[in-house]
Amino acid sequence: MRKNKPRTLLDKTEPYLWILPSVILMAIFIIVPIGSVFQMAFSEVNKAGIIKGFAGFENFEKVLTSSKFALVLKNTAVWTVCVVVISTVLGFILALLLNNAFKGRKIARAIVVFPWATTLVIQASVWKFIINTDYGALNTLLKTFGIIEANINWIPTPAAYFAWEIACGIFVTIPFVCFTALSGLQSIDSSYYEAADIDGATYWQKLFKITIPLVKPSLTVATVLNIIYVFNSFPIIWTITKGDPASRTDTIVTYLYKLAFLNSKQGQAAAVSVIGFLILLACASVYMVSTLKKGDE
Amino acid sequence: MADNLTINWKKLLTRILLYFSVAVICVIILYPYFVMACTALKTRAEIFDPNGAILPASPIWSNFVDIWTLAPMGKYLLNSVIVAGGSTIIAMLCGIPAAYALARMKFKGQTVFLGFIIVSQMFAPVVLLIGIYKVIKFLGMTNTLLGLIFINAAFNQAFTVWLLRGTFMSISAEMEQAATIDGCNRVQAMLRILLPVAAPGIVTTLIFIFINAWNEFTVALCLISTDTIKPLTVGINIFNGYNIIEWQYLFASSIVAIIPVVILFMSIEKNLTSGLTAGGVKG
């Protein structure tokens, strides 16, 4: 339609005017902070957060040689892998269940939304209360039903605390996986199953030969997003243990928060940010390739 | 005959198994909320009793009244509304034109912009907190709601643009073209023709941004220090002290904070999941 008209300067610049507000917003509040974090990571920063000069890789050296950082990295990996893998499996199974037609399905779907909609701080506070040894709800529940006699200490070690934090992470992540899988399941043409039924396929054959391959694209997107989301998750660990004792339950984000805002080591915190940023960038590129590929299909 | 019977038995059994497993899962999911509600209605002594009961002896409804005087709950609530509302407005004002340009125009750098949008959602504000703090300090917005509003709007921009672009692209451009021939300019065509048609997608997007901003915790924790300008997520931790935790008040105020969001979320859940997988964005 526009082919016949000569393109004026306004025509050429017009699209940029439309995207300008969005670009400015993201430039100031996302790109500038990214730049600032990188600058601080390579600078000597004093306690007040003022840059004192170029420091090369000094901040990185301090971070990488600190005895805690290896532990923090290991925790981050355990946290991310456990939460993502288990919630993906459980969320997919839940989606398979909810994909059946049954009475009360709407109510069940509405209930599954709850953990997704609840802010993580609140969800984590409840878990902290449930697992409390002296007066926690889990002990009360088990005692009331006569399953245990005396209160059990559910959190005897830091590792036990961390395991509960992972459980809480799984709990709040399941709904997102479930709903993405569910939307994938519902888009599968029922004729596939009809054809398989005629051929006498079993339930498991149908699951592995039809359902899983067809849901895979939406599950892949959900999984990559979850990796990033879980990696960045701060409130659960912060609310339950604050990463204590001695970083035994710290992940990268809680560790860097403490470095920056409690210990005033902003240079090192920035270095941790950059390391986290690079790990995420690797995930992001995988995600981008898969998304763009999806767009081509 | 016998064969038919076994098939029926099998069907019934899977049916029972289905209902049973769904029921168990629902009970597990609702359990934390049940604990929250029971605890919010107990006295302090009841909660800390090592041999306490599951249900409150008699519900203490006054806990829900007390929270408003023990903490500036009204202020927290208002702050949350301002932050969530403000972020939504700014995210939409910036996102709608950008999504429109991406859906309806061709320009150099389009792929770069789109690529940046996809990558930018990878970075939750936590990793960039130090940088964000610096920018906010430079702009003189530390300890203000305005700072939170901009941060939330910016970090929700990717989702906004991506989801709206999808919505706009699914609507044919013909009507707008007809309107431009009738003498409308692009802005008028978008406002009068496209936006009303795209309303369902727009509503889903704005509710989701609202919920994200409402639930945001980390940035608010870091940027806001004055008690009366804290949003709910940070403010209610007044009951969650280092030494004493007032569980009954913490959970009573939590329930106040959760209810509006759960209702909003249920209203958009169906539209949202299809939009999320199509766009591949989680806020």
Image: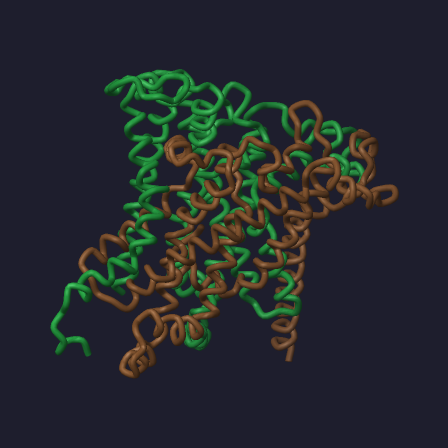
Residue B33 lies, in percent from the top left, at: 68, 47
Q: Which quarter of the rendering shows the N terminus of chain A?
A: bottom left
Q: Nearer the viewer, residue B55 or A157?
A: B55
- State the scheme by which the image is colored: by chain
Specify the farthest residue to the right.
Answer: B58
- Residue at the image position 53 percent from the left and 50 percent from the top: B84
Residue A218 lies, in percent from the top left, at: 40, 58
Asked where in the image residue A4 lies, by quadrant, the reply is bottom left
- Residue at the image position 66 percent from the left and 49 percent from the top: B28
Asked where in the image residue A27 lies, by quadrant, the reply is top left
Q: Which quarter of the rendering shows the C terminus of chain A?
A: bottom left
Residue B22 lies, in percent from the top left, at: 63, 58
The tally of labels here is 0
Residue B258 lies, in percent from the top left, at: 64, 49
- Residue at the image position 74 percent from the left and 46 percent from the top: B37
Left or right of A101, for residue A28: left
In the rendered structure, the colour chosen for chain A is green
Left or right of A5, for residue B125: right
B41 versus B23 height, above or below: above
Is there any visible trace of residue A216 in the rendered image? no
| Colour brown belongs to chain | B
B29 versus B103 height, above or below: above
Q: Nearer the viewer, residue B11 or A103?
A: A103
- Residue at the image position 35 percent from the left and 48 percent from the top: A25
Q: Nearer the viewer, residue A291 or A51?
A: A51
Q: Nearer the viewer, residue B147 or A150?
A: B147
Is there any visible trace of residue A71 in the rendered image? yes
A41 versus B15 height, above or below: above
